[in-house]
Image (cartoon, grey):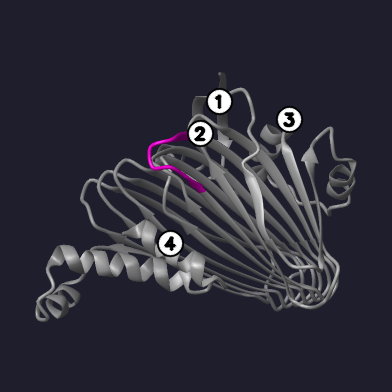
């Protein structure tokens, strides 16, 4: 076993009052010192080149990682440094054909397993890639998983990243997704967070190319004594760039959720537009919700909007359900499923949508 202590996970780009305890997250735990490769590629189309190995066994992944554009911020550095401090598994994927490509990666961990890995994705000019990543374990298995996905979308490329987290009740997941978008490229991310004891998920997107776009749709359920920590940061420095962030989730029991969402309009991003919206359905007075939507602006000719709402089921909604013979408890279940399955419908796989629906039940 080895001890892990991380003091600056998901650090917010612009700090607020320290007494709010929202600027960053921390983690201290003991994990298995031996790494287990739990990744299986279960589906892959022919127009994709894949390299896999550890730091020492695959020179191609190291070369490709060095070729990436600058993709580091204080919020991503903790995961980057943690992965670089020890042996890790690395997967590199390059799109070679302009026809739509798809790859499915499944991370299925067993009790007491520890996985650390980085995925490097290069979407060549004008290509179209869908990458689906599914994380799972048995309900009561204790696991630790650290993943960092770096995606470089070259000019005119289209990328859809899907991450579905279905870990058991004793799992810890530290996940980081980083994007770099060139001119006229389009990146979409669909994120479902349902399981785990403690989950720390970070998303950072650099919209550096002119007319590039980033769409992020996150759905979650946090219940029992789960801890869910979310940090999302879009850095807009290309002209006429566009981003939309939507976070929709449910808090139950004694769960704790923290959300940090930042749109950063940097100098030179004239004509950029950004919107972030978060909705939280509270189903327990004991659950704790912390939200801080932020807009940073160093450019005049931009449009930015943000909002965060948090509340219980409204009286009108309850009346609607009860007038049709539906109890308050069943109404809460219906609304919870609707929030998750609405986002899951964007995943281009009926089998995965059904797996999500089954997990909720």
Label 2 sits on a secondary structure element that is strand
Location of mark 1 (residue): 5
Location of mark 2 (residue): 26
Residue 223, position as x, y percentages in the image: 31, 49
Label 3 sits on a secondary structure element that is loop
Residue 356 numbered tag? 4
Location of mark 3 (residue): 87
Q: Earlier in the sequence, mark 3 or mark 1?
A: 1
Pick the front one: 100 or 180 = 100
Residue 139 lies within the magenta run: yes
* Residue drawn at the location 12% of the way across and 77% of the way down: 319
Q: Is residue 214 above or below residue 316?
A: above
Specify few, some or many for label 2: CA neighbours under 10 Å numbering under 14, 14-19, or 20 or more.
Answer: few
Residue 132, position as x, y percentages in the image: 61, 61
* Residue drawn at the location 77% of the way across and 70% of the way down: 238
Label 1 sits on a secondary structure element that is strand
Bounds of the magenta segment = 136-143
């Amino acid at each position: 076993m080895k001890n892990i202590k991380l003091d600056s996970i998901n650090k917010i780009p612009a700090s607020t009052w320290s007494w709010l305890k929202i600027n960053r997250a921390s983690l201290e735990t003991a994990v298995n010192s031996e790494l287990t490769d739990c990744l299986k590629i279960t589906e892959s189309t022919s127009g994709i080149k894949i390299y896999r190995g550890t730091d020492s066994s695959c020179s191609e992944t190291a070369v490709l990682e060095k070729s990436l554009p600058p993709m580091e911020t204080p919020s991503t550095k903790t995961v980057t440094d943690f992965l670089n401090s020890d042996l890790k598994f690395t997967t590199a994927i390059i799109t070679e054909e302009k026809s739509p490509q798809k790859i499915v990666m499944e991370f299925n961990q067993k009790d007491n397993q520890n996985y650390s890995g980085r995925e490097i994705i290069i979407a060549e000019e004008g290509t179209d890639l869908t990458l689906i990543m599914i994380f799972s374990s048995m309900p009561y298995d204790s696991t630790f998983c650290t993943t960092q996905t770096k995606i470089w979308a070259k000019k005119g490329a289209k990328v859809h990243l899907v991450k579905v987290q279905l870990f058991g009740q004793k799992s810890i997941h530290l996940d980081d997704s980083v994007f770099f978008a060139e001119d006229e490229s389009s990146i979409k991310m669909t994120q479902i967070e349902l399981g785990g004891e403690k989950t720390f998920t970070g998303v950072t997107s650099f919209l550096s190319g002119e007319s590039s776009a980033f769409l992020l749709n996150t759905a979650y359920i946090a219940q029992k004594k789960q801890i869910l920590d979310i940090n999302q940061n879009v850095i807009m420095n290309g002209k006429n760039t566009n981003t939309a962030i939507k976070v929709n989730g449910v808090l139950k029991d004694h769960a704790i959720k923290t959300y940090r969402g930042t749109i950063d309009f940097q100098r030179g991003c004239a004509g950029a537009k950004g919107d972030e919206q978060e909705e939280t359905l509270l189903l327990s007075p004991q659950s704790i919700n912390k939200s801080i939507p932020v807009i940073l602006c160093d450019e005049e000719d931009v449009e930015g909007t943000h909002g965060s709402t948090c509340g219980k089921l409204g009286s009108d909604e309850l009346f609607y359900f009860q007038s049709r013979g539906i109890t308050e408890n069943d109404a809460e279940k219906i609304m919870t499923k609707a929030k998750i399955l609405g986002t899951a419908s964007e995943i281009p796989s009926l089998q995965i949508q059904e797996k999500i629906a089954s997990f909720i039940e």
